[in-house]
C-alpha cells in the first residue's frame, strides 16, 4: 500500500537546497511502489528557478498541480518530508521528517534544536559533520518553573545520507581561455565562502604568470542582470589593487546547466578546483569536481570530509586533496545570522601561506595531483552510486521490519508505520 508523502521543498530552485530537494525526489521515485508523491514548491532566498523542460520538471509540475487539488479537497498526507532549515519545520502529517543540509559551523542554533524537537520525528542531514554538530550541541535552559537544565539538546534521531554521483555529458561554456593553467572556483559571494581572500591570495600568488587563470563561477544572490553588474563591480574593485597583474580572472555569472559545469570540471586546462570557504554542509561543487577527476585545493574540515577521504592499505581514511592548513576561530560578526549562525560558534579560517603553497603545488606536482585525483574519483564512483544513496535515503523514510517484509511477501503490500 502506497503512502501519500508530501515533499515541501525549494525543488525548482537553482541552489544547493534545490539540488538536495531533487535528490530526495529521485530517491523516492526509485520506490514509487511505496510512495504516492505530492509536492509543494517553496522559494529559497532570491535564487532563480529551473525553467528547462525535462522529464523531471514535468513530473514536478504535474505533482504540484495534483497537490493543489488534493489540498483543496482537504486530503490528508501520511508523511511529510520538509527540505529546508529547521526553523521552518512544521507539523503536517502523522510522520514528519526534516531534511536539512545542516550546519557549517561548530554549533547549532537553539531555535533549530527547539523546532526539530517540536515538529519533526527525525532528521536527515547530508554529512557526518552536520550530524555530529546537531548531536553534540548542548545548552543550559530554564523551564517554566525556573529549574536549570544544563544539557538541553536534540532529542530526535539524526541520519546521514550523502549525495550520489550523476553521469552528465559535457557541453561548452562560451569562454575564450587565453591561459593554459586554469583554476576553478564555484562559490556564492558571501561571508561563508571566503571569496575575497580566495581571489586576492590567488592573484598575489600568480600575478607575474600570464599562463594562469582563475575561472570564477559566482553570484551574490541570484542569476539576475543586476546581480551580475554587482559582481563585476565588486571584482573590479578587488582587482584594482593589482593593476600590473599578468594572471587572468574570468567571471562566469548566471545559471549553468549540469553539462556546462561538467565541461568546466573536465576542461583540459583546468588544474584544480579551489575552495577555502569557512565550512560546508556538504560541498556539492567539491563533490562534482572530485568525481570528474579534478584535483582539489581545500581545507580538510566540515562536510566535504565525507567524500574527499579515501582509505589507505590499512583501512584508515586520509584526505586525497591538496590540503590547506586552517584554524578554527569564532565566526565573523558580519556572518552572524540570528537563529542560523550562532555568534559563539566557530568555523575554519584558511591560512594564507598554506593556501598559496597549495596553489603552487597544483602546478609544480601536476602529474602526482592528477594521479591522486583519479584514485579519489574511482573511490567515489564506486561508493557513491545513485542506487546506493537512493536506497539509504528511502531507508530513513521507511525501513520495514522482518515481519512487514514477510507480510509483503504474502499479501503484496506493506503498511508504513
Image: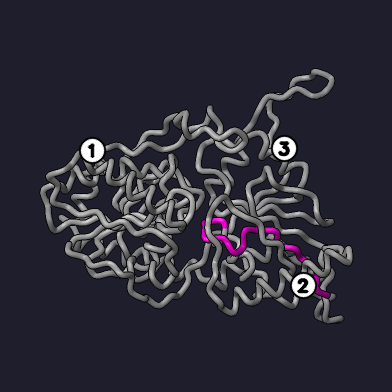
The CA distance from mark 3 to mark 2 is 32 Å
Q: Is mark 2 on a helix, strand or loop?
A: helix
Between circles 3 and 2, the one closer to the viewer is 2
Q: Residue 168 is drawn in which quadrant?
A: bottom left
| Residue located 48% across and 50% down the image | 221
| Residue located 36% across and 76% down the image | 171
**Where are the magenta residues, as a range?**
1-17
Seen in the picture, residue 340 relative to 69 is either above or below; the reply is: above
Quarter of the picture containing the C terminus is: bottom right
Relative horizontal placement of residue 379, taking residue 124 as reference (left or right): left
- Whichever of callouts 3 and 2 sits on the residue coming sooner in the sequence is 2
User: Horizontal and vertical percent for residue 33?
Assistant: 74, 78
Residue corresponding to mark 2: 66
- How packed mark 3 is, by other alpha carbons closer than 10 Å (few <14, some 14-19, many 20 or more), is some
Q: Which numbered circle lies on residue 353?
A: 1
Residue 159 in view (yes/no): no
Q: Is residue 13 magenta?
A: yes
User: Horizontal and vertical percent for residue 414?
Assistant: 82, 73
Q: Verify CB contact (< 8 Å) between mark 2 and mark 1.
A: no
User: Horizontal and vertical percent for residue 198?
Assistant: 31, 45
The single residue placed furthest to the right in the displayed view is 74
| Residue located 76% across and 48% down the image | 90
Residue corresponding to mark 3: 114
- How packed mark 2 is, by other alpha carbons closer than 10 Å (few <14, some 14-19, many 20 or more), is some
Foreground residue among 182 and 54: 54
Q: Is mark 1 on a helix, strand or loop?
A: helix
Amino acid at each position: 500500500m502506497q503512502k501519500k508523502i508530501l515533499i515541501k521543498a525549494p525543488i525548482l530552485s537553482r541552489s544547493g537546497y534545490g539540488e538536495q530537494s531533487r535528490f530526495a525526489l529521485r530517491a523516492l521515485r526509485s520506490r514509487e511502489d511505496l510512495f504516492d508523491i505530492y509536492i509543494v514548491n517553496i522559494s529559497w532566498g532570491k535564487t532563480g528557478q529551473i525553467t528547462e523542460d525535462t522529464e523531471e520538471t514535468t513530473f514536478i509540475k504535474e505533482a504540484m498541480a495534483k497537490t493543489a487539488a488534493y489540498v483543496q479537497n482537504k486530503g490528508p498526507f501520511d508523511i511529510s518530508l520538509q527540505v529546508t532549515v529547521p526553523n521552518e519545520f512544521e507539523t503536517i502529517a502523522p510522520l514528519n521528517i526534516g531534511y536539512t543540509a545542516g550546519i557549517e559551523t561548530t554549533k547549532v542554533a537553539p531555535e533549530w534544536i527547539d523546532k526539530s524537537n517540536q515538529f519533526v520525528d527525525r532528521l536527515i542531514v547530508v554529512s557526518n559533520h552536520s550530524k555530529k554538530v546537531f548531536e553534540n550541541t548542548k545548552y543550559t535552559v530554564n523551564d517554566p518553573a525556573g529549574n536549570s537544565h544544563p544539557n538541553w539538546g536534540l532529542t530526535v534521531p539524526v541520519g546521514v545520507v550523502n549525495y550520489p554521483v550523476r553521469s552528465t555529458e559535457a557541453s561548452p561554456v562560451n569562454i575564450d581561455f587565453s591561459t593554459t593553467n586554469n583554476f576553478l572556483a564555484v562559490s556564492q559571494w558571501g561571508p561563508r565562502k571566503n571569496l575575497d581572500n580566495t581571489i586576492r591570495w590567488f592573484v598575489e600568488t600568480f600575478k607575474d604568470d600570464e599562463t594562469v587563470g582563475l575561472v570564477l563561477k559566482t553570484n551574490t544572490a541570484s542569476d539576475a542582470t543586476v546581480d551580475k553588474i554587482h559582481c563585476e563591480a565588486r571584482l573590479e574593485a578587488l582587482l584594482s589593487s593589482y593593476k600590473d597583474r599578468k594572471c587572468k580572472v574570468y567571471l562566469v555569472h548566471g545559471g549553468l546547466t549540469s553539462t556546462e559545469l561538467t565541461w568546466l570540471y573536465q576542461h583540459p586546462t583546468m588544474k584544480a578546483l579551489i575552495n577555502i570557504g569557512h565550512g560546508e554542509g556538504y560541498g556539492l561543487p567539491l563533490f562534482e569536481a572530485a568525481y570528474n577527476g579534478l584535483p582539489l585545493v581545500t581545507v580538510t574540515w566540515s562536510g566535504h570530509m565525507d567524500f574527499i577521504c579515501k582509505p589507505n592499505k590499512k583501512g584508515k581514511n586520509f584526505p586525497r586533496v591538496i590540503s590547506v592548513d586552517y584554524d578554527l576561530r569564532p565566526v565573523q560578526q558580519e556572518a552572524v545570522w540570528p537563529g542560523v549562525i550562532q555568534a559563539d560558534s566557530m568555523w575554519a579560517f584558511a591560512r594564507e601561506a598554506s593556501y598559496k603553497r597549495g596553489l603552487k603545488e597544483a602546478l609544480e606536482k601536476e602529474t602526482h595531483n592528477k594521479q591522486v585525483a583519479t584514485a579519489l574519483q574511482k573511490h567515489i564512483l564506486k561508493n557513491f552510486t545513485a542506487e546506493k544513496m537512493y536506497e539509504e535515503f528511502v531507508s530513513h523514510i521507511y525501513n520495514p521490519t522482518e515481519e512487514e517484509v514477510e507480510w509483503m511477501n504474502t499479501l503484496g503490500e506493506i503498511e508504513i508505520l
